Image: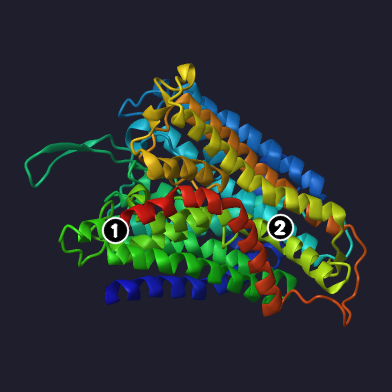
């Protein structure tokens, strides 16, 4: 166990150490400063802009940023929907996987466009290689969109009074070419040399040690898995995701994949400090996020390492911890760490089955997505935290009797209303969806078109755990996470359509809000700092932000957690 803990601590510390220079590099990329890789990427970017006819030097206001962001995402959605709907008749399908139903294609297309990668299908049999490659493209661009939105926020925070906030396409392309692409090449190369497939061959037939003949899927997996983590996407090339021996062959690849999903969200926080030349502010933000992360991950790891009390009562030894749903080659410590890292960062990939997690672990995984403000996904993690900063500044200003100010700009009613709406939207989408599904399940409703049979048929587990499965599905959708309690039968019109709507609303409205707030603040008159100005780069302000996050999350979600994983915990006791 000590060795397992040492491995987890090492991965976490190395990720932080490497994130600082990467953050400095990201800041230089968005500022337009010279970097070592300019001779490589500048010609590629110029060619892209020349072919597309885009003037990357044209300044945009926040509304133009938003228009460009929404327009390009709509085009990607329709393209992906078409590919998935007709993949059975298209090329690069050596295993003859069938086309998706309209509701599943709708859900999958939205899920990958919004950087969630909620998968109501199994990768081996659900999609062709052409579809996998298009989904891999979406994993790049959806991450790039989030990072471009964050870059606009950086610019709005940096400038004194302006409505010119850079160019969306410039930020977007640079995010893909100069940050995500080179990192993906490195990670994909490591995975390929470690045993992950990277080819276009059909299934291979092997004979197991037991003498059974098994068809094993292959394909361009290494490239897909690299960007799935670096872009905080999480969609598995194989159905078992990173618990699959070809997607994650060894403890070393497990460490690389963990590092991959941590590095960019960490680096974006430090990039903010370098971009604004306010490194202390980024350290405060990182400190608040890290405290929140540790409060989630430590109970999870302890619970998984201590084993299942119900099994202990049967007199069965659990020296290796709670191993149900976990891979022997990883163990409970790093599996518990991964489960919180992937839910906090909104990656959604799994190296163990979350449905088999202990109740406390399940509660922590849910809470990580419900809070949705510790580290977060590529770019959008900063956007989510920005909302809580605005609310904390407003509340702090009221407490000391001063007009709230952040970085020299007055925060007034309009900005606070937007921030409050975004903060309320997250629990509204999660709890509304869960309430609807729970009502149908509780009344064993005949669903007709929406589900073949009565609603109880989509639950493999009754009672508290069944409620947790439904709660987890909507929480994962609203948090753009994509992981799931896989006891839920979710590939049907009811779950495909309802989660698809939640995915759509929970991705773009929380991007619209911070962009609007940042644009409105950038337009305001700059107020020089005075003796009475509330300093936002102090530990006291960090505690205030953490308190706002804790209060909003606790008040909104504690009743639902009490009905699900917490109730299950007490039944085990």
Residue named by callout 1: 194
| Residue 475 in sight in this render | yes
Name the foreground residue: 368 vs 459.
459
Instruction: Using the image, determine if residue 330 lies above or below residue 480.
Output: below
Which quadrant is home to the C terminus? bottom left
Left or right: 95 with respect to 77? left
x, y (%) of residue 468?
44, 45
* Gap between marks 2 and 1 measured at Cα: 41 Å
Instruction: Using the image, determine if residue 237 lies above or below residue 300.
Output: above
Residue name at image x 15 percent, y 61 percent: 315
Badge nearest the viewer, 2 or 1: 2
Q: Quadrant of residue 399?
A: bottom right
Q: Quadrant of residue 156?
A: bottom right
Element at label 2: helix
| Residue 35 in sight in this render | no
x, y (%) of residue 151?
70, 58
x, y (%) of residue 25?
61, 69
Q: Residues within 10 Å of mark 2 (few under 14, many from 20)?
A: many
For the rendered model, the colour scheme is: rainbow
Query: Which residue, as the protein is rendered here, is positioned at the far left?
Result: 211
x, y (%) of residue 408?
85, 70
Q: Residues within 10 Å of mark 1 (few under 14, many from 20)?
A: some
Residue named by callout 2: 387
Residue 507 tag number: none
Residue name at image x 63 percent, y 43 percent: 428
Query: Which residue, as the protein is rendered here, is positioned at the far bottom?
Result: 531
Name the foreground residue: 96 vs 336.
336
Residue name at image x 54 percent, y 50 percent: 559
């Amino acid at each position: 166990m000590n060795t397992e803990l040492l491995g987890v601590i090492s991965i976490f510390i190395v990720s932080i150490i490497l994130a600082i220079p990467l953050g400095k590099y990201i800041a230089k990329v968005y500022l337009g400063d010279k970097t070592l890789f300019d001779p490589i990427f500048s010609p590629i970017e110029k060619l892209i802009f020349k072919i597309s006819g885009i003037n990357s030097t044209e300044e945009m206001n926040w509304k133009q940023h938003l228009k460009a962001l929404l327009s390009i995402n709509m085009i990607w959605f329709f393209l992906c929907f078409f590919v998935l709907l007709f993949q059975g008749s298209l090329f690069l399908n050596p295993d003859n996987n069938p086309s998706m139903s309209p509701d599943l294609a709708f859900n999958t297309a939205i899920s990958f466009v919004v950087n969630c990668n909620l998968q109501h299908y199994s990768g081996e049999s659900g999609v062709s290689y052409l579809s996998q490659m298009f989904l891999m493209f979406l994993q790049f661009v959806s991450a790039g969109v989030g990072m471009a939105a964050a870059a606009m926020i950086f610019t709005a925070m940096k400038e004194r009074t302006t409505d010119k906030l850079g160019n969306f396409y410039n930020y977007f392309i640079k995010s893909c070419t100069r940050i995500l692409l080179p990192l993906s090449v490195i990670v994909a190369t490591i995975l390929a040399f470690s045993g992950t497939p990277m080819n276009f061959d059909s299934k291979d037939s092997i004979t197991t040690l037991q003498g059974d003949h098994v068809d094993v899927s292959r394909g361009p997996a290494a490239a897909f898995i690299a960007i799935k983590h670096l872009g905080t996407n999480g969609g598995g090339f194989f159905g078992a995701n990173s618990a699959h021996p070809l997607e994650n062959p060894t403890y070393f690849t497990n460490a690389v994949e963990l590092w991959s999903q941590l590095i960019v969200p960490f680096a974006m926080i430090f990039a903010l400090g370098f971009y604004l030349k306010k490194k202390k502010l980024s350290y405060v933000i990182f400190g608040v996020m890290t405290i929140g992360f540790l409060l989630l991950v430590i109970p999870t790891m302890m619970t998984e390492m201590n084993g299942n009390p119900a099994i202990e009562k049967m007199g069965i030894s659990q020296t290796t911890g709670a191993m149900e749903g976990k891979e022997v080659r990883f163990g409970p410590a790093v599996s518990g760490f991964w489960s919180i890292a992937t839910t906090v960062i909104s990656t959604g990939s799994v190296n163990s089955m979350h449905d088999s997690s202990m109740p406390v672990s399940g509660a922590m995984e849910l809470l990580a997505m419900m809070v949705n403000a510790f580290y977060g996904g590529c770019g959008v993690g900063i956007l989510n935290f920005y909302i809580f900063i605005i609310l904390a500044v407003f509340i702090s200003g009221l407490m000391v009797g001063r007009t709230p100010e952040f970085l020299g700009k007055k925060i007034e009613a309009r900005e606070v209303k937007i921030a409050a709406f975004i903060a309320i939207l997250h629990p509204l989408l999660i709890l509304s969806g869960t309430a609807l599904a729970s009502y149908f399940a509780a009344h064993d409703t005949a669903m007709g078109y929406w589900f073949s049979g009565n609603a109880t048929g989509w639950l493999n587990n009754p009672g508290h755990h069944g409620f947790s499965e439904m709660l987890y599905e909507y929480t994962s959708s609203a948090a753009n996470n994509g992981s799931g309690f896989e006891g839920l039968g979710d590939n049907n019109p009811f779950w495909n359509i309802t989660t698809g709507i939640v995915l759509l609303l929970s991705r773009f409205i929380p991007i619209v809000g911070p962009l609007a707030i940042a644009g409105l603040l950038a337009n305001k008159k700059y107020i020089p700092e005075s003796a009475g100005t509330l300093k936002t780069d102090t530990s006291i302000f960090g505690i205030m932000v953490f308190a706002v996050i804790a209060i909003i999350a606790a008040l909104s979600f504690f009743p639902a957690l009490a009905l699900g994983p917490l109730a299950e915990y007490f039944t085990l006791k």
